[in-house]
Amino acid sequence: MKFTRVVSTMAMTAVFATGLLPLSVSADDNLVNVYSARKEALIKPLFDRFTAETGIAVNLVTGKADALLKRLEVEGDATPADLFVTVDAGRLYRAKDAGVLQVATSETLDKLIPAHLKDVDGYWYGMSQRARTVFYVKDKVDPAELTSYEDLADPKWKGRICIRSSSNIYNQSLVASMIDANGVEATEAWAKGLVANFAKPPAGGDTDQLRAAASGVCDLAIANTYYYARLVHSNKESDNEVAAKLGTAWLNQDGRGAHVNVSGVGVTKYASNVESAIKLMEFMASDESQVWYGAENNEYPVVEGVEVSPVLKGLGEFKADDLELSKLGTNNRAAVELMDRAGWK
Amino acid sequence: MKIEKHLNVESVTLAYGEEDVVHNASLSLEKGEIGCLLGPSGCGKSTLLRAIAGFEPVKSGRICMRGQVLSDAHNILPTEQRNIGMVFQDIALFPHLTIAENIVFGIKKWSKKDQTLRVQELLSLIGLPDIAERYPHSLSGGQQQRVALARAMAPKPDLLLLDEPFSGLDANLRETLVPEIRDILRKEQMSAILVTHDQMEAFAMADKIAVMQHGRIQQCGSAFNIYHEPKNRFVADFIGLGEFLQASIKDEYSVDSALGCLVGDEPLGYAPGTSVELLIRPDDIQHSEQSSLTGRIVSKWFRGSHYLYHVKLANGEVLPCITACHHDHDVGEDLGISIELDHLVVLPICDPETGVCDLQESEVVQTQAVAR
Amino acid sequence: MFVVTPLKSPYRVNWLTSSSFVIAVLLALPIFVIAGFVFSGSADVFTHLYHTVLFDYVSNSLLLMLGVAFGVLLLGIPTAWLTSVCDFPGRRIFAWALLLPLAVPAYIIAYTYTGLLDFAGPVQTAIRQLTGLGYGEYWFFEIRSLAGAILMLALVLYPYVYLLSRAAFLEQSASTLEVSRTLGYNQWQGLFKLALPLARPAIIAGLTLALMETLADYGTVQYFGVNTFTTGIFRTFYGFGDAVAAAQLAVCLLSFVALLVLVEKYSRRKSRYHSSAEFKAKAKLISLSGWKAAVAFLICLLPILFGFLIPAGQLAFWSLTQADLSDGSFFQLAWNSFYLAFLAAIIAVSFALILAYASRLNPKKVVRFSVATAGLGYALPGTIIAIGVIIPFAWMDHQLIAMAKKWFSVDIGLVLSGTLVALLFAYTVRFLAVSLGAVQSGLDKIKPSIDGAARTLGCTPMQVLKQIHVPLMKSSVLTALLIVFVDVLKELPATLILRPFNFNTLAVRAFELASDERLIDAAPASLLIVAVGLIPVILLSRSIAKGRAGS
């Protein structure tokens, strides 16, 4: 009996504690509600700064892009969300396609962000960019051998390449960009050749591929630039050593350029605080924020003329593929299917 | 107008799903009377008891107590509102409560003082005054069953139901506990219904016994009545020992059988010449050294104070016979017997397979049993 | 004097049945929503998967289940038997310490061991430095593999088998085992001929829980690059952006699990009995000494060592030496995790009590079906449950908003889908199976005559539940509370999707950092999950042990 009482007392306490939470978030001029697929640690500091400067509070939920997108869809016109943040263009395309975004008109943004890094109709804008390229083991590979993504399928790389699973969106986007360049059939043949060159079955994340290469498992690792930059930037010696063993190769520099993707943001169709939301987007595109992306996230700015962070400068200059990023979204399904067929796990 | 008894069970039919398990059962009980549902396992006696307790719904008929309808085909008064106490076969004391807490469980609305008094009163009534603070698992089976009785009686229920309360106890304990509990019930003037398959328990406890088989009440009456005037073969078989002899009705008072012509003290109610069965109880047959009537001993059973023999007659029929202890004979010997019958029990011949009897008489028996 | 009480219709007694039916249907709603997807969309994705990877997914899932089943039985049964029947040094501590791995989320143990055993990790680096060998020149266990995933899952899921089979072993009365000895079996033969077969329903119940959790696992297998049916669901969802096809795959998973559950029910149905074991004489412990005691000690130590001490130690080491602790919101995160888990445990167990009790009182087929359906949620990945929850909840929200606008002309916003209500509901759906299992087995042990006795003494059915059943099955209820609490603490995918604005838990924080490939920075949050989970594991396992000891 006593036990029952203790439990019910604790339950009551917990219920009261819960009661203190806001039940729902309603429209308010001084408020922006954000659904973000970008991790809290990589975006919250920016929002905090925005709040400090403008007095506009930012509410944040983070999560997986497709799940948040589903949440937006079912919430419909009742959604509290004003902004939808993703870490790849493919998901922004999906959001536009699902009809949960609206055209947000901002002269500032239109002026700052180049055409290939935003939606043609103005549904979303890229806010930071990164390249997906090859990192080679300096002792074993002559960078002159590395010319293009297409070349990675060459049998000379047999057993020498580390790359993560095809379930990962970065790989899907890379293949989507190659479909745009070479068509499905050629890309499938390429994927088959690439799979034949794997040093080990794909597992783990990009950093794991870099570490594997540095410790001798393979000679080439395919990874996003910020993972490599983070190792360079790290205050752990072991990380710095990994980075020191690897060199960056920029591919297709004579052709379409290195594959890039963006993190981006769009205003939701039923946003209650459109004005504040656009203000926040403009803040994210400001010089201050763009520099912050480089310093904190090791990403490249989207705004022309903004200084690239020193670590990224160390990777060298490169020509980026100026493929219209919506294509990554349209080709994504075909990319996954062809990777399935190619046996890319 | 019909006079309301304390408890009336009126033509009750009970069913599990589609299957009827108790058919058209009726019985009644006076205030302070102890009734008994007696029958083999699976006869529906416990189901009927559970229906009285309110655990099972009634398909047709109704159950009333003190003039109030407890159950009928459409309504059922929840058990907890019936003011009926119950003692279970597996005792079912609450293992997490002390003896005193168990007993108080049903009288929590009473004042603390009354509760304490009642616990003391009941504990001394069951002869265990010092166990109030102990837990059930520290008591013996007999003690637990007495506590269960005390717990059921604590709220002074209008009716106490006892569902085979002694079947889990050993024979010796049962012999002492049964009369003890009857005395306790008498002292408290408790109306009660006992369910059992043991006729000795039934005889020791009950004022009134209803014998059940296949979901029907076969006969209802006092212990003496049921033993000596069974209404059908089942009751005769189930209650006490006995054998049946083929016989035919000679006239209003007598029958012809392998034992010769036997004369009873009451009219038999069959037409002369009808084939019937004659019930012979062991105490109807005496050992008599001089008797010309003999039978060969086929089995022998030492029963402490006496021997029970079965002897085979010349025509192959077998009779029971009780002799005093010193009449020690062996199987295979011939035993002289004499007949000491003053009341004839004759029953119609029924087909053991179908249960269909030749005679109208069986119908009479059935309806009589129901009407009681 | 006698007060005439008005008659009540039979339905009055059955309000419990009807309310349990409502609860069961409500909890089964997300499953029905997911199942409803079968009727929409096209079979394109199926055709594609069938021609490419489906065989891989299915065979990997089956191998994974087989391996985990073998692993949890191997770890769970001997330890349960040793700690309940034998006496050896450390037995009392092992009895509760063997539950500790329950507090470690599978994805976290996977991260931890990868950090240790990966090619670039300290163990292999040390081997290379000592031997001078390079990659491919020596054999080492590849942690990122199917075998690795099996090992990780078995290490954290065996406590389910341990918990339930230990309870069964403890209940086996002294006389049962003594009978086996009079029949000529020695103690060890008695184990295989009698104790194990008798405990089989409990073992299978524990195994079912472990396997359902295995099927629902996404974090571990995805991290290890093992493509299972569940990773297939998410590949379809995330890769194709096709939630409908993903839900259809989930339905396939569900049907498979339903089959599994039916098999389990069947095996349990055969041995349904009301044991009065609670207060039976305790069997005398078999005293072990010498090498036998040492072996017993080792058998019990190893699962704790690998399932708890090493990963927790590694996390602690990372937290103290290398992790970035600059974000000081850990207390808030721990509190959020704690009360969410606590509330969910209370709700899930209360519902389980009502459902189990209703099916005890009135075993209607329709109620049983709904309860069984709701119980299937345990095998579904949290993300799928979350989608099944948010669709009907958002619909209800829209109705509420429309009503509020019409009658009060206020905008109330999303009162269900945007708040903790949805999250708590999703937890309840997801973890109903565990609480229901524990509560039901506790209820089954109470003889029906106990109910009858209480009813004749004036208790309503609800009072019987409160005054008799709950105190009597205290240990079962505590077990249910404990498992749900720990499970919710570890839960990630549903939390991620359904939580309200600015609300984080330890699991979310650990996941965000780990999935950003910052394993070491994820260590403090992971360690806190283990620590918060540890407190109730220790408290409750002690209280359960005390309850068992009798009064």
Image (cartoon, rainbow, N blue to C red):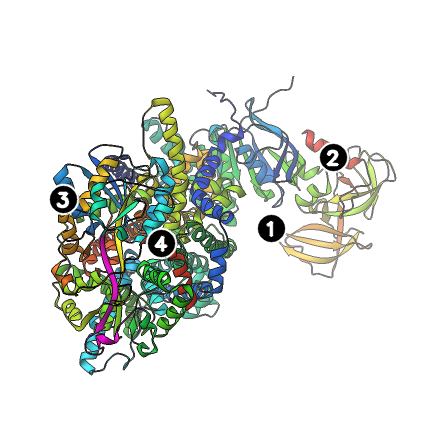
Q: Amino acid at mark 1?
A: Ser
Residue A329 is tagged as 4
- Residue found farthest to the top: B1
Label 2 sits on a secondary structure element that is helix
Label 4 sits on a secondary structure element that is helix
Asked if badge 2 and badge 4 are on a common chain, one would say no
State which tag comes first along the sequence, 3 or 4.
Answer: 3
Does residue A229 appear left or right of residue B250 in this picture?
left
Could you tell me how far apart the alpha carbons at marks 2 and 3 are, in whole angstroms?
A: 99 Å
Label 3 sits on a secondary structure element that is helix
Report which residue position mark 2 lands on: B365
Task: Tell me which segment is drawn in magenta.
Answer: A128-149
- Residue A156 vertical placement versus B44 (above, below): below
Task: Indicate whether residue C348 is drawn in magenta.
Answer: no
Q: Is residue B137 visible?
A: no
Report which residue position mark 3 lands on: A49
Could you tell me how far apart the alpha carbons at marks 1 and 2 are, in whole angstroms?
A: 36 Å
Q: Are marks 3 and 1 in contact (CB under 8 Å)?
A: no
